[in-house]
Amino acid sequence: MTFRQFAFNNVLRNKRLYVAYFLSSMFTVMVFFTFAIFAFHPAFSGGSVNSKAMFGMAVAGGIIYVFSFFFVLYSMSSFLQSRKREFGLLMIQGASSGQIRWMVFLENMLIGFFATVGGIVLGLVFAKVILMLAENVLIISESLDFYFPTLAIIITFISFIILFLFISLFVSFILRTKKLIDLIKGDKQSKGEPKASALLAILAALLLIAGYATALFVKGVMVVMVMVPVIIVVILGTYLLFTQLSVSIIRRLKKNKPIFWRQTNMLLFSDLSFRLKDNARTFFMVAIISTVAFSAIGTLYGFQSYLTNGMKEANSYSITYYPLEDESKTDIKQDVKQINTILQEENIQAATEKVTLNYFDLGDNQNVLIAKASDYNRFARLIDEKELHPKENEAVVMDNSQSLTNTNEGETLMKSPVKLDDGREIQPYRKATSSVLPEFRAYYVVNDHVYDQLGKPVRSGDHFVWQAESGQSDQLINAGKKISEQVGFTAQAFDYIDYQINKAYGPIMFIGLFIGIVFFVSAGSFLYFRLYTDLDEDKQKFGSIAKIGLTQRELKKVVNRQTAILFFAPIVVALVHGAVALTALAHLFEYNLFKEASLVLGGFALIQIVYFLIVRYFYVKQIRSAIY
């Protein structure tokens, strides 16, 4: 058997440990390759796709490449840590330090080669699906047909072979510093009873509470000002949480006899403190990486929702037309005619209304819109909103200012009566939120008879709206483009504006989603790797306990609870961090992101549960097969 065959057999013998490392590496190669397929797609060669999207994908590819380097390096270091005893035995048998380094180098290059080839093959298999997904998300006019990406294959292959070459050389250098006695002892060295500093455990809790409280209670621009200090405090608190506070809590539970002596708790807690201490740095890294993934995707999704919902609230109608104050009646008539012509060209069925909005002086140089109830109701009927019928001594304050301008002008109007020409005052009796009339600020709606007694307005403006029947979105987008070109900015079609926002935002969302998924999958791989590194030790431990009476049911119960705690501890911390971060973002924009945060965090939690069930099934199966 040659040395290369020996290295190859070593990989096969350790395939269980290598599988997470191999699959995760292959996945990152596939993601990088997918980006390369986009970047070199023939449809983009003409430069019709905006440069920001291409630049974003190039940056994303770079981030994935750099992250892959550190991920593979960490995985290899953890893997070699569990093989120290094996290396020591090889040295006793006569293997030199150079031969072991050469063997590790060959093993790693072998894994790297197959992971690179596998990632490229998988990327090719799913290329068409991903191209179709990108075609819709990016909202581009070009059709991203499948092509054979020769250039993308060459760049991906060379990039990742170089990456694995550097990793292999680096790992070989690390092995050179190990002494034989350290290698022989390997994982048999006593770890001792895990200890935690009470002071540092308290500090961990205080740092997290201080970070959370600051993030949750500050509002507006203060969120940006405290962001960096809060992130530093929470990161430090998270590290101490896993290294000190968690161990301290387990030690306290072990001292609580009613809990510790109950059923199999003794077995669970005795091992858990060692596991938490050993895996503290991995948990810390997984928690931070997952938090970055949750926060990034949640922020992108929330920001898109903020933009599109803000537009919907400001534009209740399919098309609106606001003539300028100095625009002549002839020009206005011509613009309205032009819009109607475009709607006919696109075969759009739409109802239309016109209103003259009058603003009155409230004193203190404050002008406010006062609308006639009949005008309000005509517009309300157009979009199926509730009509208003105020009595002659009543005024209704309609306030949409809080969601659009982050002010609360409605409260001010509620304290200001509407003054009539004859000196009487009409008191506002209730406040409501509405976007029926095109006014960003709060305004009054009064009875028609009262309206006629308001006197002369300080300024007026005509307003036209068209409300199209449902199911005409594509025609409205085309019509909106024509209206924008032929009438100008005074006329707006909501579907076209929404299309433009999504088109500009699509590439950012697409890239952010990909990077977030890569981070999340890598975090899951870290946990898988750490869990299976201790599999042999667990087999021996549970095998010994089984000899003194541990039943299969008790074994399953202990393993389930232990793996669940180890698997979910960093993810739960990351979910809490992510929820706090998205709440702070909501405070920054004063916009409720509960729905968006729930969807993102709930989605990731669901994926993690499915991942845990799969990993646990095979883990328990291997433990049971080794014992019973």
Image (cartoon, helix red, strand yellow):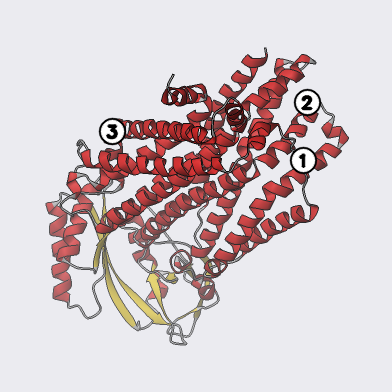
Q: Position of residue 159 (x, y in %)?
A: 33, 44
Tell me where residue 411 sits by quadrant. bottom right
**Sequence-earlier tag: 3 or 2:** 3
Question: Which residue does the numbered mark 2 point to in the structure image?
Answer: 264
The answer to whether 580 appears left or right of 203 in the picture is left
Q: Secondary structure at mark 3?
A: helix
Element assignment for label 1: helix
Q: Residue 286: horizontal and vertical position, in percent?
A: 56, 44
Q: Quadrant of residue 517?
A: top left
Which residue corresponds to mark 3?
124
* Secondary structure found at label 2: loop
Mark 1, Cα crowd under 10 Å, few <14 / some 14-19 / many 20+, is many
Mark 3 and mark 2 residues within 8 Å of each other at the beta carbon = no
Q: Amino acid at mark 3?
A: Leu
From the viewer's perspective, is 467 left or right of 245? left
Pick whichever, 201 or 445, lies toward us: 201
Q: Position of residue 132 (x, y in %)?
A: 27, 38
What residue sits 21% from the left and 44% below the top?
Answer: 41
Mark positioned earlier in the residue sequence (1 or 3) = 3
Q: Residue at x 39, y 33 (%)?
A: 115
Residue on which the image places disc 1: 250
Tally the marks: 3
What residue is rendered at 47% in x and 71% in y?
392
Disc 2 crowd rating (10 Å Cα; few below 14, some 14-19, many 20+) is some
Inspect the image, locate mark 1, and give the three-letter code of the amino acid beneath it: Ile
Residue at left 47%, top 31%?
A: 103
How far from the left and from the top, in percent, is residue 358? 34, 76
